[in-house]
Amino acid sequence: MTTEVGSWESGVGKSGTVTASSPTDRLTDLPTGHLRIAHLADTHLGYSAYGRADPVSGRNQRAVDIEESFAAAISDILTQDVDLVLHAGDVFHHTRPSWSTLTHFVRQMRRLEQAGVPAVVIAGNHDTPRLRTTGSVFALLALALPMTRFITGYETEEAAFPDLGVMVHGIPHGALINPDPPAVMLHPTLRNIAVTHGIAPGFAAWAGREAGEADLRGNVLDTRFDYVALGHVHLRGEPGINVRYSGSTERTSWGDQAAQPGYALVTLGERGAVPQVAYIDIPARPMETLSPIDAADRSARDVADMILSRAGALGLPHAMVRVEVQNAPRPLFRETDAIVRREIGGNAWHIRLTAPGDLLDPLGRDAIGGLADLHPLALFESFVKEKVAAGIYDAAFAGAFRERGTETLEKAIARLHEASAAEGAAP
């Protein structure tokens, strides 16, 4: 099955020949068969944390977990008789993934190619270089995976699949951060599918904010699209009747605890019909949060025993567990943490202690569950709004102050994440 790319204004016939057509407001004039699409996103290959080694390969265990979840998603997709695979961004956790990460990605995508299933992959904020002149690894991957269409630059591109009656409009992260918003032209006769990566209106408060992310702008959420495949938010969501977040294939922060890893299986009927979406679960390492523990008037030994007992009671020896320790002076907190790390045994795979002041989990992007309103960016925005409402700041000053303050906070949060991730990945 071939992929034809370029302007659609002349139309592309099913045989691959160019045929005449005229734009029309009516996009449902020709009969079409059902189409099955696998929509996945946020695989974050190359992510690592906690410094635990996989006993078989010796590599970081969380990096291996991430790879295994992606492989499991591909394996399941191959059983679903899909016509097309869409990856809505953040294939990789970094712009420069390791050779082992690249090898794993190519190996899994070649399974799709060998099965004759075409795929379209766009870049997200994590795998888009900050400097446009840098180039990216996707140029190399395009040579290794000829049946996979990569749309990873700074412009909207189209990939036509005439045999499927589909035009895929790829809007990568880079196209969302241009001065002008994307302006997608819908094909007059083919089904129109958009694939993009960013925050839909109303989802920022729900999913949290991340430095470097993009808001969805332009007409990328047009209701005339037959389907809009979104990435970036790791929880499944429905911003519109024809729009879905597939969720991530694994969890990469404590803000993802409520996420069910997997992908979306989409069935399209006639053009203009509401897409039918089923979410497919993929096994992943469990994440659990224990109820807070008050360390007042307790020894480190007592607090550690309480944590280990509660973690063991979950019956999840492979789980990542988090617990907030309250009223613990720093020396007591550190001693408790050392005991828990030393004696964790089969109670859990990893136990992370947090203090009440840790509004951001250092290995995640979101506020601790239940405290989303206390995220620094949310607090800053509330502060500015209060000053404007009180007449202390005028509109011009508030706008400039909000822009500078938000930028400064996002940089500080990013530095915190980078430093903590490096600490977590250290052996």
Image (cartoon, helix red, strand yellow):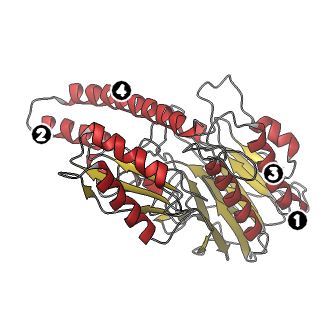
Q: Nearer the viewer, mark 4 or mark 3?
A: 4
Q: Which of the two discs, 4 and 3, labels the residue nearer the N terminus?
A: 3
Residue 389: mark in rendering: 2
Q: Which of the two discs, 1 and 4, labels the residue nearer the N terminus?
A: 1
Q: Nearer the viewer, mark 3 or mark 1?
A: 1
Q: Which of the two discs, 3 and 2, labels the residue nearer the N terminus?
A: 3
Q: Quadrant of the N terminus?
A: bottom right
Mark 2 in CB contact with mark 1 (< 8 angstroms): no
The image position of residue 162, as x and y in percent, is 82, 61
Where does label 4 land, which residue? 408
Count neighbours of disc 2 (C-alpha within 10 A) and say few if under 14, some if 14 to 19, many if 20 or more. few
Where does label 3 land, which residue? 148
**Looking at numbered disc 2 in the image, what kind of residue is underneath it?**
Ala
In front of the other: 7 or 142? 142
* Left or right relative to 305: residue 28: right
How far apart marks 2 and 1 lie (CA) works out to 60 Å
The image shows residue 310, relative to residue 427, as above or below, that is: below
For the point 64% across and 26% down, which residue is it?
A: 132
For the point 35% across and 42% down, which residue is it?
A: 335
